């Protein structure tokens, strides 16, 4: 007997729906947290190897317990709030930066549907916490919200280095968000939907709709390579990765916006950096590399692509110097923004013609 | 804070700042991120080495010189012992082997100093990997240091009239292998930096200083040669037998951070060449001059006859007494001209010792190199000047 799976909805089976939802949230959150923790370990190991040293080795086999040790250490350290700092804003800032980084994961599809039978009915559950019909906009909004955390940290610390870091972050993120946003526009001009699930589905078709090329999927990286490049570079700037790590620029601004933070509050900034890295990798995978599509199980393909991106980011950090503030602005406004605009126009013309 | 106008912000960069290379303090007047005024404040590492020298015998001062430019201790040793030898008038009596070994060790020191410079300069600009690559090579030099002098940083190896010890057996081969590997390593650093667009953007045209301005201030060393002035004491006023070696003095005319970077990298290649030439010319021989009033007698003599013992005792407790007079001896240290000005009043310790540290003089170029530029350029310029606070504050 072939049953068409029924989609789980809140109105039909409220308890089951809530339960499944909670499980999905828990799994996504825990997995993200684990990746955050082990991204720090991986980064230290990979960069260590690139720099002819070992990385962590003492805590557990191959230093695998290092993230946990770091977390525990930071958790038990004295939490210093400078006397001249704005108390409320100072505490709020790290939360404001971490929460948006994790929330973005909510709309990212990390696999196809899971089928299960309950009470004689076959249900299909999408491997995605929620499929917003404006998923892309939601991610952009959350990325924008993350800036506030950094700006707030810079202002609330009442320290000059932190202030400079905060100012740099504001300018940098606003500049690059434009280029990133415009590069994504070209994607949903092609997919004609803002739902991330819809965008992934559109990428499972054969390349450029040509049946003879069906062995290559229609990943948008093939028809929008420029947008892909702009998105990756812009995202690196948005999440403050080298070579765009000006807001924290250790050698210039001591530690930039998080100079005055210590203990768990500092750890939150640290986690947010890696959570953002995961989010950006996941979004890039979804928008340009066909999301969960690929030769293995859905979520495995997804994770492989995400890890690929993260390796790329780590590798860049090991090899590139840091840009200067004016050069960063020049790149953002005079090179990437015009390119993104041109890409939108050209894509529009191409879509009209074909 | 109250003194701030609404237009500018005063920021204390240092002495606790990760990239002021020690304890340099810069008072920066910032308009946004543009530096309006930069005032270096020095003195946080002042140990009174010049004053201390007035109360020590000439030999006891050598360990103090290790602590001047602590990244290039043997160059300081060399500058000092050459000055004392000149004061004593025994410059011509230094055995050939001593001169060769001094050249080998000071050129290795130049490599050591330049490696730390490149490491920190690159790290300041954000290229992390170069830092560790450079320290890997520096490690070999510190190993060589340890084998010849027993210490990895504060070597205290040269003596007035000679050396503390001869090279241990097998060290020459090790130095040769190391010197032969240097060109390939420099290529490696260049591969990471020279062609990198971001590195070029951060260094080309940054921290410019014209040849005239550099000469006016008295800037020496690679910073002067990158401004187009062909001046190197090793060639233009040779000491310790430098006239025997053929080497090029790299000169560039860009006057900026990038050219200073290139000059120093070329110097590293030349230093390796000099080391190899000196190794070729190194022959067995005495490691102390034949000046019984200055150098310690053989251990055999000290243990076996009373004259030797008394001789040893006199030199260790009293030292030697140069004629009344004053001299200046400059050498080409890794960072520029390192000069020792010694005044003798005929006693066993100098009446006055004035050190001309290259970093101190070169640092004076900083304000005019950074004013009107961005905060990030300050970091690049501090790096490119290659300052060491140990010799600035003395």
Image (spheres, coloured by chain):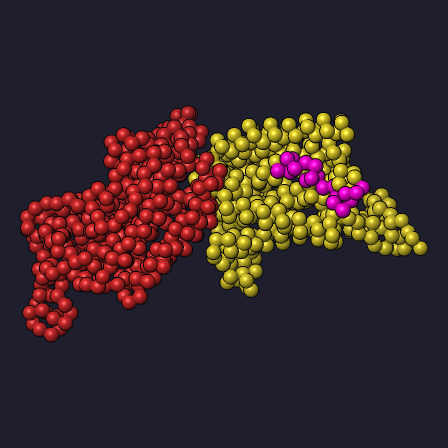
Picture quadrant where residue A253 is located: top left
Asked whether B238 or A329 is in front, the reply is B238
Q: Residue at 51% across / 48% down in the picture? A: A318
State which quadrant residue B146 falls in.
bottom left
**Residue at horizontal 31 percent and vertical 55 percent from the top:** B276
State whether the magenta stretch is mostly helix, strand or loop: helix
Residue extending farthest bottom: B304
Relative side of B132 to B46, left or right = right
Identified at 37% across, 37% down, the residue is B259
Residue A190 visible here? yes
Q: Which chain is yellow?
A: A
Question: Residue A176 magenta-drawn?
Answer: no
Say above or below: B64 vs A323. Answer: below
Question: Which residue is at 78% across, 38% downward?
Answer: A209
Residue farthest right in this picture? A1
Q: In the image, which residues are magenta?
A: A211-229
Eyeballing the image, is B302 above or below A139?
below
- Does the magenta segment cover residue A225? yes
- Against A173, residue B103 (above or below) is below
Q: Nearer the viewer, residue A226 or A97?
A: A226
Name chain B's colour: red
Q: Residue B388 appears at what percent x and percent y? A: 31, 45
Q: Is residue A118 left or right of residue A338?
A: right
* Residue B173 vs residue B74, the one in the foreground: B173
């Amino acid at each position: 007997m072939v049953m068409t799976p029924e989609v789980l909805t809140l109105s039909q089976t409220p308890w089951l729906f809530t339960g499944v939802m909670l499980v999905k949230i828990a799994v996504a959150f825990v997995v993200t947290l684990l990746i955050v923790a082990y991204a720090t370990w991986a980064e230290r190991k990979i960069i260590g190897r690139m720099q002819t040293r070992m990385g962590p080795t003492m805590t557990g086999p191959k230093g695998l317990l290092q993230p946990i040790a770091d977390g525990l250490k930071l958790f038990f350290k004295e939490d210093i709030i400078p006397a001249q700092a704005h108390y409320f804003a100072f505490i709020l800032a790290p939360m404001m930066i971490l929460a948006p980084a994790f929330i973005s994961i909510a709309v990212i599809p990390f696999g196809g549907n899971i089928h299960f039978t309950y009470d004689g009915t076959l249900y299909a559950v999408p491997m995605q916490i929620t499929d917003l019909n404006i998923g892309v906009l939601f991610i952009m909004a959350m990325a924008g919200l993350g800036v506030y955390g950094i700006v707030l940290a810079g202002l609330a610390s009442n320290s000059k280095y932190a202030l400079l870091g905060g100012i740099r972050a504001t300018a940098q993120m606003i500049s690059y968000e434009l280029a990133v946003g415009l590069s994504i526009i070209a994607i949903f001009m092609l997919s004609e939907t803002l739902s991330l699930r819809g965008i992934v589905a559109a990428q499972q078709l054969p390349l450029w709709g040509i049946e003879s090329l069906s062995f290559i999927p229609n990943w948008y990286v093939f028809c929008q390579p420029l947008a892909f490049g702009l998105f990756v570079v812009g995202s690196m700037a948005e999440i403050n990765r080298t070579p765009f790590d000006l807001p924290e620029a250790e050698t210039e601004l001591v530690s930039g916006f998080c100079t005055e933070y210590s203990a768990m509050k500092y750890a939150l900034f640290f986690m947010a950096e890696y959570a953002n890295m995961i989010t950006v990798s996941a979004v890039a995978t979804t928008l340009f590399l066909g999301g969960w599509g690929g030769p293995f199980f859905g979520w495995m393909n997804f994770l492989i692509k995400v890890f690929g991106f993260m390796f790329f980011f780590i590798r860049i950090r090991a090899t590139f110097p840091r840009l200067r503030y004016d050069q960063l602005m020049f790149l953002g406004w005079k090179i990437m923004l015009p390119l993104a605009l041109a890409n939108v126009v050209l894509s529009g013309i191409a879509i009209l013609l074909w | 804070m109250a003194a701030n106008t609404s237009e500018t912000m005063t920021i204390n960069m240092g002495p606790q700042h990760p990239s002021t290379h020690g304890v340099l303090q810069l008072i920066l007047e910032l308009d946004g991120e543009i530096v309006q005024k930069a005032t270096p404040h020095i003195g946080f590492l002042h140990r009174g080495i010049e004053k201390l020298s007035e109360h020590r015998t000439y030999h006891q001062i050598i360990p103090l010189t290790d602590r001047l430019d602590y990244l290039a201790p043997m160059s300081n040793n060399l500058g000092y012992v050459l000055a004392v030898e000149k004061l004593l008038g025994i410059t011509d009596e230094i055995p050939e082997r001593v001169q060769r070994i001094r050249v080998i060790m000071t050129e290795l020191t130049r490599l050591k100093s330049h490696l730390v410079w490149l490491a920190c300069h690159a790290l300041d600009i954000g290229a992390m990997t170069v830092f560790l690559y450079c320290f890997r090579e520096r490690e070999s030099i510190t190993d060589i240091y340890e084998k010849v002098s027993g210490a990895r940083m504060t070597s205290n190896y040269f003596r007035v009239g000679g050396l503390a010890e001869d090279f241990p057996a097998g060290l020459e081969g090790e130095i040769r292998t190391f010197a032969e590997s240097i060109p390939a390593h420099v290529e490696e650093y260049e591969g990471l930096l020279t062609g990198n667009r971001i590195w070029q953007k951060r260094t080309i045209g940054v921290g410019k200083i014209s040849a005239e301005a550099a000469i006016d201030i008295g800037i020496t060393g690679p910073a002067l040669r990158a401004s187009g002035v062909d001046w190197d004491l090793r060639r233009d006023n040779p000491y310790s037998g430098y006239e025997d070696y053929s080497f090029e003095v790299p000169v560039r005319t860009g006057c900026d951070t990038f050219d200073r970077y290139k000059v120093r990298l070329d110097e590293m290649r030349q230093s390796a060449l000099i080391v190899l030439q000196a190794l070729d010319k190194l022959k067995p021989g005495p490691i102390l001059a034949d000046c019984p009033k200055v150098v310690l007698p053989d251990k055999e003599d000290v243990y076996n006859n009373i004259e030797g013992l008394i001789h040893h005792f006199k030199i260790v407790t009293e030292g030697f007494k140069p004629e009344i007079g004053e001299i200046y001896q400059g050498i080409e240290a890794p960072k520029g001209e390192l000069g020792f000005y010694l005044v003798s009043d005929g006693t066993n310790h100098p009446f006055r010792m004035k050190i001309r540290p290259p970093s101190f003089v070169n640092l004076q170029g900083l304000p005019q190199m950074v004013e009107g530029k961005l905060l990030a350029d300050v970091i690049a310029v501090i790096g490119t000047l290659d300052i060491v606070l140990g010799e600035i504050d003395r």
